[in-house]
Image (tube, rainbow, N blue to C red):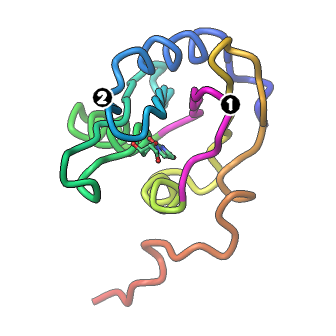
Amino acid sequence: MTATVDWQPLIEAALEARQRAYAPYSHYAVGAALLTEDGTIITGANVENAVYPLGICAERVAVARAVHAGHTRFRALVVATVNGGTPCGACRQTLREFAAELPIVTVDAQGRVVLETDLAALLPHAFSPRDLPQE
Ligand code: THU
């Protein structure tokens, strides 16, 4: 499934996005790069806040930026952290809204691939829009 994705530009975009993280509290900078269906790369980084719970993850920044730019279909996601950490549960659910089987790669700060997976593996038996009763 991941064979058709050109991962290197996404990895570079996620690493660059990570440089623009605002993470003065956790010091855990995260960069995300989403590949849209039409080949556009949309990035995000985590943005923390002095009111700690208000911080937002890199992946959700990327999703919000993408949707606001008119993209709701995604082909791949790269997440860059110091150690190749995976998307948190909230981000998995946010991504699930748009891409049930999204291929995901995590990389470390040097761009080395740590994990190759997909959203179906990260969020099995997910609640999805189809679970809501139709009128
Ligand atoms: N973080 C992300 O940006 N994405 C994730 O999926 C995991 C966590 C951020 C949130 C917070 O700013 C910092 O990493 C430490 O949790």
Q: Along the line of sight, which residue is nearer the eye, 28 or 111?
A: 28
Amino acid on which the number 2 mark rests in the picture: Tyr
Image-based side of 38 in relation to 85, left or right: left
What label sits on residue 61 in the rendered view?
none
Residue 77: horizontal and vertical position, in percent?
Answer: 57, 33
Residue 83 in magenta stretch: yes
Residue 36 drawn above or below residue 122? above
Of marks 2 and 1, which one's residue comes earlier in the chain? 2
Residue 57: horizontal and vertical position, in percent?
Answer: 39, 44
Disc 2 on helix, strand or loop? loop
> Magenta residues, as a range?
74-88
- Look at the image and tell me in which quarter the C terminus lies: bottom left
Disc 1 on helix, strand or loop? loop
Question: Dot 1: few (<14), some (14–19), or many (≥20) neighbours within 10 Å?
Answer: some
Image-based side of 39 in relation to 109, left or right: left
Q: Is mark 2 within 8 Å of ligand 1?
A: no
**Image point 47% across, 27% down: which residue?**
31
Question: Dot 2: few (<14), some (14–19), or many (≥20) neighbours within 10 Å?
Answer: many
Image-based side of 39 in relation to 69, left or right: right
**Image point 21% across, 38% down: which residue?**
68
Residue 39 drawn above or below residue 26? above
| Pointer 1 residue | 83
Q: Along the line of sight, which residue is nearer the eye, 23 or 41?
A: 23
| Pointer 2 residue | 22
Residue 87: horizontal and vertical position, in percent?
Answer: 57, 48
**Image point 49% across, 72% down: which residue?**
128
In which image quadrant can residue 114 be found?
A: top right
